[in-house]
Image (tube, rainbow, N blue to C red):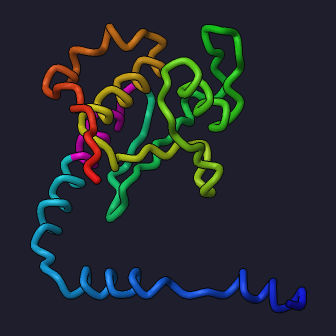
Amino acid sequence: MSTRSKLQSQSTSNPAAVSQAAAVAALNGPLSFFAEWRNTYKMRRDRVVALLHGRAGLDCPTPDGAFYAYVSCTTQIGKTTPGGKLIKDDSDFVMYLLDDFKVATVQGAAYGVSPAFRISFATSMYVIEKACISELALSTRHRPSLLSKVACRKFPPPLPVTWVS
């Protein structure tokens, strides 16, 4: 096989027949569950915005049609972490969130929105509550335990996932 043929075979391909059939079945099947899904995402989005917008110097506009929100962290730039590290930009801020609070977000610079961070709400309400509480704790230089009364009482921890094959 020539080098060109090898390259072409790896760069152009089509979905497997079974995947094509699954896509057709999904598109032609019932879509009534979408209303419930949309409402769930709306509740999660609204909770993220309610927890973060206007608190601790953060600005979290309500996103339209996304599973994430961009939160401005402008007020955090130039501050120093308790460990003595200067937060120079949103990359430093998200690393601080990850290192000190185990909250994974993405720096806004990766999407051309800086200084900000992107937080997903495609997760359980429990995880959203804990992540937002941690971000508020970080932004106000307190520990999450002092802020846990804000909302975490309402939602039990997620159940363990059981995989069925």
Residue visible at 44% across and 34% down in the picture: 58
Q: Residue furthest right?
A: 3
Instruction: Indicate the quadrant containing the N terminus: top left, top right, bottom left or bottom right.
Output: bottom right
The answer to if 37 sits in the magenta stretch is no
Residue visible at 67% across and 87% down in the picture: 12
Residue visible at 10% across and 73% down in the picture: 32
Please provide percent x and percent y for residue 11.
Answer: 71, 83
Q: Nearer the viewer, residue 137 or 102?
A: 102
Residue visible at 35% across and 34% down in the picture: 52
Direction from residue 145 to residue 40 in the image, left or right: left
Q: Nearer the viewer, residue 11 or 105?
A: 11
* Up-down relation of residue 52 to residue 123 (above or below): above
Direction from residue 41 to residue 111 in the image, left or right: right
Please provide percent x and percent y for residue 54.
Answer: 35, 34
Report the predominant secondary structure element of the magenta stretch.
helix
The quarter of the displayed image where residue 20 is located: bottom left
Please provide percent x and percent y for residue 56.
Answer: 41, 24
Direction from residue 57 to residue 133 in the image, left or right: left
* Up-down relation of residue 144 to residue 118 (above or below): above
Instruction: Indicate the quadrant containing the C terminus: top left, top right, bottom left or bottom right.
Output: bottom left
* Up-down relation of residue 135 to residue 60 (above or below): above
Magenta range: 44-56
Q: How many marks?
A: 0
